[in-house]
């Protein structure tokens, strides 16, 4: 009994969940962290039960679980999985085999650790290294593109004025030369085509300015934004007012569900507006059905970390798994060159991280997509 008590004291001192399983995956012992993790109130109710039955109430092992095979093979195995209770988390599971047959210690010890933050930091460091050099390159390219484009945009209005001044002289000539044609066009057709060409050049120049603006936004170092207490309902309604007209031109139905009782949130208004406008317009652009719809809803979560959840859903074209994995990469886009540069969601992702939140995406091809913007209660510890 003393040895058992000592062993329990030792394993209880370990902060990560530990479970001892026998060869049939039945639970022989677990530490305090494991009890808290699996929300076990009385240890006696789960001892000698298979883990899938004790923790999940399942008659058979969980689909895809490698623990039973690792125990039977007496192999040390390490793998990562989505959180057992929270799919947004990443867990590392380590299986240590027990091989003391003469002492009856056949089975394994399973250790579970949360590596979400570590994985996030690794991805962030790798991303920052890539973007540091890419940002310098993009900044230089944007500058070099902008200079000649300024010549175009500045000279187009001057050229248009010159043509307007010359038109009366041409029209006087045409009065006395009936049937005048140039480039296979009558004079009215030629005049219309000249100004149409000018409009096309001006539109192209504006498009270049838009792309350069996106490139500069991508490459410039973000200043520390001021966070203030915002009326989130009022903020969302302001965003909807900005882009409702454009959305309703692209989809049949646009629905808004915002509770009146939402409390204030500590955030940056400009960032939040930019995030929501981008996600809403993307949802509308994904429309591909006659009964297309976009829905925006907001609700409170259950913890300070998931304080506010804003969801934008649509029944549009959706995305496959490969596309979902790339949508936050800079310059990745599934749109045509006229509709985007592939920087919108990248910038949104960065802004959400600056607010201390995260964005989750669910999507199926031809079924639609849901983007959830999850923001923490950053003032939860204030007096």
Image (tube, helix red, strand yellow):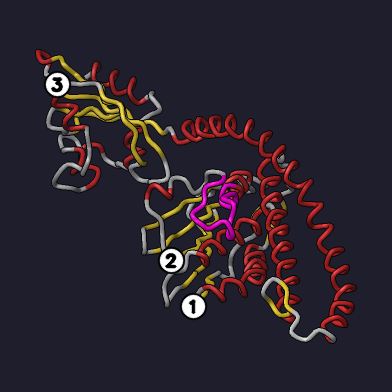
Residue 89 visible in the snapshot: yes
Q: Is residue 376 visible?
A: no
Residue drawn at (68%, 34%) of the image:
136
Q: Which residue is mark 2?
A: 316
How many callouts does the rendering have? 3
Q: Say which label, 2 or 1, has the lower sequence index.
A: 1
Q: Position of residue 298 (x, y in %)?
A: 53, 64
Residue occupying image coordinates x 61% and y 56%: 275
How far from the left and from the top, in percent, is residue 268? 69, 52
First reached walking from the N terminus: tag 2 or tag 3: 3
Q: What residue is shown with label 3?
A: 106
Main SS, magenta region, reads loop
Q: Earlier in the sequence, mark 3 or mark 1?
A: 3
Crowding at dot 2, Cα within 10 Å, few <14 / some 14-19 / many 20+, comes out as many
Looking at the rendered structure, the secondary structure element under dot 2 is loop
| Helix, strand or loop at mark 1 | loop
User: Which picture quadrant has residue 353?
Assistant: top right
Circle 1 Cα neighbour tier, 10 Å, few/some/many (<14 / 14–19 / ≥20): some
Name the side, left or right, on which 207 lies relative to 118.
Answer: right
Residue 338 in magenta stretch = yes
């Amino acid at each position: 009994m003393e040895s058992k008590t000592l062993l329990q004291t030792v394993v209880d001192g370990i902060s990560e969940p530990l479970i001892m399983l026998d060869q049939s995956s039945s639970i022989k012992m677990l530490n305090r962290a494991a009890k808290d993790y699996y929300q076990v109130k009385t240890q006696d109710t789960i001892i000698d039960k298979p883990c899938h039955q004790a923790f999940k109430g399942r008659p058979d092992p969980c689909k895809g679980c490698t623990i039973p095979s690792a125990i039977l093979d007496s192999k040390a195995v390490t793998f990562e999985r989505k959180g057992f209770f929270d799919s947004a988390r990443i867990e590392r599971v380590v299986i240590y085999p027990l091989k003391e047959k003469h002492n009856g210690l056949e089975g394994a010890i399973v250790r579970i650790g949360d590596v979400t933050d570590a994985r996030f930091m690794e991805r962030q460091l790798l991303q920052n290294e890539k973007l540091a050099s890419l940002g310098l390159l993009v900044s230089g390219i944007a500058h070099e593109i902008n200079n000649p484009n300024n010549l175009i945009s500045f000279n187009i209005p001057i050229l248009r004025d010159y043509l307007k001044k010359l038109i009366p002289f041409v029209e006087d000539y045409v009065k006395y030369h009936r049937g005048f044609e140039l480039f296979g066009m009558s004079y009215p057709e030629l005049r219309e085509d000249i100004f149409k060409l000018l409009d096309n050049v001006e539109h192209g120049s504006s498009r270049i300015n838009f792309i350069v603006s996106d490139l500069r936004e991508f490459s410039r170092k973000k200043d520390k934004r001021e966070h203030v207490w915002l009326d989130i309902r009022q903020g969302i309604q302001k965003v909807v007012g900005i882009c409702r007209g454009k959305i309703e031109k692209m989809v049949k139905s646009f629905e808004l569900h915002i509770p009146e009782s939402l409390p204030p949130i500590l955030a940056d208004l400009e960032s939040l507006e930019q995030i929501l406008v981008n996600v809403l317009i993307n949802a509308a652009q994904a429309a591909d059905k006659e009964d297309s719809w976009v829905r925006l809803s907001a609700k409170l979560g259950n913890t300070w970390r998931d304080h506010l959840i804003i969801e934008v859903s649509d029944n549009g074209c959706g995305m496959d798994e490969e596309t979902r994995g790339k949508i936050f990469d800079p310059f990745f886009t599934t749109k045509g060159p006229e509709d985007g540069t592939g920087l919108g969601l990248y910038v949104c992702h960065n802004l959400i991280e600056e607010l201390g939140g995260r964005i989750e995406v669910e999507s199926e091809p031809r079924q639609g997509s849901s983007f959830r913007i999850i923001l923490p209660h950053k003032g939860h510890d204030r007096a």
